[in-house]
Image (cartoon, rainbow, N blue to C red):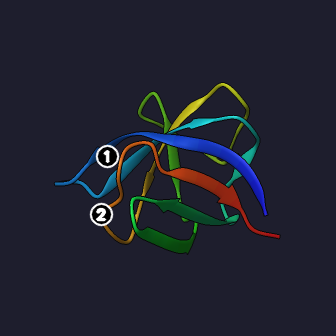
Amino acid sequence: MNEIGKVTHYYGKLGVAIIKLSGELRVGDKIKIEGNKIELDQTVDSMEVDRKKMDEARAGDEVGIKVDQKISEGAIVYKLD
């Protein structure tokens, strides 16, 4: 399990988390988000950078992904093996 980013914002009405990446992320990757008593495992079904759909993103990018439950800003994002 490798840390690949941190949640910088969460849009509750849309169910979208903005993640500042410190590693690579691709559509289809399995991730875990942990923070503030929340632990969420899910697969990245789609992601956007600057409102454009992307298949992959690199360290330094800020991506938006749809999440299955409410998460908190500051939560850590891990890529599962």
Considering only vertical position in the picture, is 1 above or below 42? above
Given the current orientation, which residue lies at the most extreme right position? 81
Q: Residue at x 40, y 68 (%)?
A: 37
Q: Position of residue 31 (x, y in %)?
A: 63, 65
Q: Amino acid at mark 1?
A: Tyr
Tell me the quarter of the picture where residue 18 sits: top left
| Contact, mark 2 vs mark 1 (Cβ under 8 Å) | yes
Q: Residue at x 70, y 64 (%)?
A: 29
Q: Position of residue 53 (x, y in %)?
A: 52, 43
Q: Which mark is residue 70?
A: 2
Left or right relative to 10: residue 67: right
Tell me the quarter of the picture where residue 1 sits: bottom right
| CA distance separating discs 2 and 1 | 8 Å
Q: Residue at x 56, y 74 (%)?
A: 41
Q: Amino acid at mark 2?
A: Lys
- Circle 1 is placed at which residue position? 10
User: Does the image show residue 64?
Assistant: yes
Considering only vertical position in the picture, is 52 above or below 35? above
Label 2 CA crowd tier, 10 Å (few <14, some 14–19, many 20+): some
Q: Residue at x 72, y 50 (%)?
A: 3
